[in-house]
Image (tube, rainbow, N blue to C red):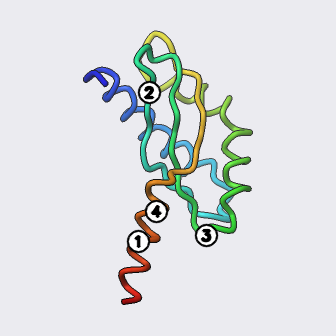
Amino acid sequence: MTNRNDKVANAIKELAASFLGRENNRTSLITVTSCSASPDLKRATIFITVLPNSKEASALLFIKRNLGDLREFLKKNLEIKTIPFLDVAVDLGEKNRQKIDELLREK
């Protein structure tokens, strides 16, 4: 990734966290862990974690329903010519790290 891609991905991450913090239905804690943008900045994937894990599917559906509103929020607050199309995914790397920490604490 280039420096510009990193800056845009980081800005999307911060703005998405702000948007979700404001629009969240308060039944779960949604944390934006990272964002990756394609080299041409046409697509971006926002990675999230959800607590409790039982609310993960409903939180993912909630975010996917609100992707249009999130994109509009980015248009207003992000100063780039083309706003990327957004996708949301659960951060499996973070889930694996938490599982390893849990296993290490048990020993």
Mark 1 → mark 3, Cα distance in angstroms: 17 Å
Name the residue nearer the viewer: 42 or 25: 42
Quadrant in which the N terminus is drawn: top left
Mark 1 → mark 2, Cα distance in angstroms: 28 Å
Residue 37 disc label: 2
Amino acid type at mark 3: Pro
Amino acid type at mark 4: Asn
In the rendering, at what x and y percent does residue 59 appear?
Answer: 68, 54
Residue 100 disc label: 1
Residue behind mark 4: 96
Disc with the residue nearer the chain's start (4 vs 2)? 2
In the rendering, at what x and y percent does residue 28 appear?
Answer: 63, 64
Identify the element where label 2 is drawn: strand
> Is 12 positioned to the left or the right of 21 in the image?
left
Residue with the most extreme bottom position: 107
Mark 4 → mark 2, Cα distance in angstroms: 22 Å
Label 1 or label 3, whichever lies nearer to me, is 1
Residue drawn at (40%, 18%) of the image: 39
Name the residue nearer the viewer: 72 or 1: 1
Label 4 or label 3, whichever lies nearer to me, is 4
Amino acid type at mark 1: Ile
Res 54 → quadrant: bottom right
What is the crowding at mark 2: few (fewer than 14 residues within 10 Å), some, or many (at least 20)? Answer: many
Label 1 or label 2, whichever lies nearer to me, is 1
Residue drawn at (41%, 71%) of the image: 100
Residue drawn at (45%, 22%) of the image: 38
In the rendering, at what x and y percent does residue 66 appear?
Answer: 69, 38
Q: Are marks 4 and 1 in contact (CB under 8 Å)?
A: yes
Disc with the residue nearer the chain's start (4 vs 3)? 3
Eyeballing the image, is 27 above or below 7? Answer: below
Name the residue nearer the viewer: 67 or 92: 92
Residue 52 disc label: 3
